[in-house]
Amino acid sequence: MPIACATLPAGMSKRFYITTAIDYVNGQPHLGHAYEKVIADTIARARRSLGGEVFFLTGVDEHGQKVQQAALSEGKQPQEYCDELAAVWQAFARKLDLANDDFIRTTQQRHQRIVHALLSKLYQAGHIYKAVYKGFYSPKEETFLTERDRLPDGTFDPAYGEVIELAEENYYFRLREHQKWLIEYIESHAEFVMPEYRRNEVLGFLKTETLEDLCITRPVTRLRWGIPVPFDTNFVTYVWFDALTNYISIPAALGDPTVLSALPGVAEPGAPGLALWPADIHVIGKDIIKFHCVYWPIMLKAAGLPLPKQVLVHGWWQKDGQKMSKSLGNVVDPVAVIDEWGVDAFRYYVLRELDIGPDGNWTDASFVARYNTELANGLGNLLNRSLAMLKRYRGGLVPSQSAELAPEAERTMTRVRALLDQNKLQTALIEIWALVDRANQYVDQTAPFKLAKDPAQASRLDHVLYSLAETCRILAVLLWPFLPGTARKIYTQLGLEGEPNKFELARWGGLVPGHQIGEPVPLFPRKDKA
Ligand code: MSP
């Protein structure tokens, strides 16, 4: 089948399209979900700051057995239950200060329509067939069990209740015939799975195991809460097939020409016609790599659509060296952390502490240490003393321009730009803090409080005060993708209008002599925990 080619209408340019995994609506928003969304948001903001047009999508995954069961156990209809929880997740996105352009719920009509179109197309083209599956089934848990679920003595965990042998008809999506193509594709597209060790993991799996065709339906007799299968009303769609499709359903609904050329007629009436597909980055956690790097590319290829440019795989957080779990009571609640410390303290910690790839470990002690050392004493103190001195010694009026810290600031700007291009967020923060530290050291070396006592040093003091205020302004611009609220506050305290949201504003010399700055207010009030 030919792959749809994005010949965009004149004047239409493709946006940088970034997505997150869509969270199970029935779970509690926790550190892991928050981390992933903050990564994607920072990349999205960085691309915007660098001048790109961006579309950032996140959302929730609402169908499936667990949601159906949870709703019923609360005496609610699944839709009502999902509506309540989707509101919680949307509020969570706001709490994290995400600048997402849309929020998908898989129960929305605009999504279901595209799942239908995709299933129909794949069925008609012979990619889907019906077959009987025979296996061990737990009626209590309403799930099939595999050999891997057996205990060492060969029995199944009593939690599954009575296990019976069951034969069930379902629809299957052909995977096996695409295995060789997928290996070649991943081998020839080095950037498709990042970091590289995750790519090797996928290749290792594809080269050693034969792909089983994927069961993509569930009979309505045991699951009602799913998207009906268009060619057989006795079945609903398997939740992962439904969920992965979200990445193209929003582009299609918005009138993306590439998706529409493979699935005609599915745009929403009055769609703006944004060009989004193929996605530039899917940000996901390491546990769902097989779905995104094996099933999803094959689904797209079978539909005649180009593949996303990159699946960016992050690691998992632990708390105090242990897996987070409700039963251990060690789940980090991002909302509680944000309420106590502020959203940017949270965003800073997760982005600075953990590179995108390896697993991380949250400890309250390291959170507090980074807050006090890097945010309060580092950035916060720099801004506060720079502005307080400018107020005290020059009535808050920016003195004539100086370029004493310009070489350092410009070097930082160049490095950060290159790092943002490669999504190296942690290293970019390290670079930015090298400038924070350099500026703080500059205060100690030049000792403006001493210069202020000597009228003969007035011009020297002007140089120092200008260089400090200008460095703070540049820091606001560099920090905007990571800590948007803090960047805004720095701008406000400098008495500047607008947002520091364009990278080019980080050029030295933006502060104009005679400009009146605003009021200094501590950015990160020190909190000495009892
Ligand atoms: N609904 C599916 C995803 C469908 S995407 C088409 C799902 N949902 S989830 O709520 O279980 O997980 C959502 C994301 O959160 C995943 O990318 C997962 O890796 C991430 N995390 C969940 N726990 C995590 C940690 N402890 N640490 C880091 N991320 C983790 O899977």
Image (spheres, rainbow, N blue to C red):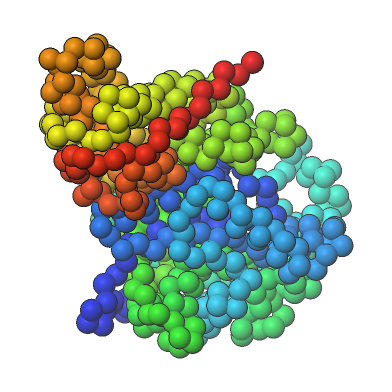
Q: Is residue 121 visible?
A: no
Rendered image quadrant of residue 76: bottom right
- In the displayed structure, would residue 72 be above or below residue 268? above
- Residue 79 shows up from this direction: yes
Instruction: Pick whichever, 99 or 76, lies toward us.
Output: 99
Q: Where in the figure is residue 414, as x and y percent of width and height?
A: 18, 40
State the image coordinates of residue 5 (x, y, percent, origin top left). Answer: 28, 77
Q: Is 157 left or right of 267, judged from the image as shown?
A: right
- In front: 246, or 483? 483
Residue 133, image x, y percentages: 67, 67
Residue at x 32% of width, y 39% of height? 517
Residue 91 point in image, percent of width and height: 61, 54
Q: Please name the residue shown 79% across and 61% down the image.
A: 71
Q: Is residue 52 left or right of residue 93?
A: left
- Residue 235 lies left or right of residue 285; in this view the side is right
Q: What is the quadrant of the C terminus in the image?
A: top right
The quadrant holding residue 172 is bottom right
- Would you place residue 62 above or below residue 302 in this image? above
Residue drawn at x 49%, y 73% as measured from the top left: 249
Asked if 439 appears above or below 279 in the picture, the reply is above
Task: State the residue at coordinates (27%, 60%).
Answer: 52
* On-image quarter of the N terminus: bottom left
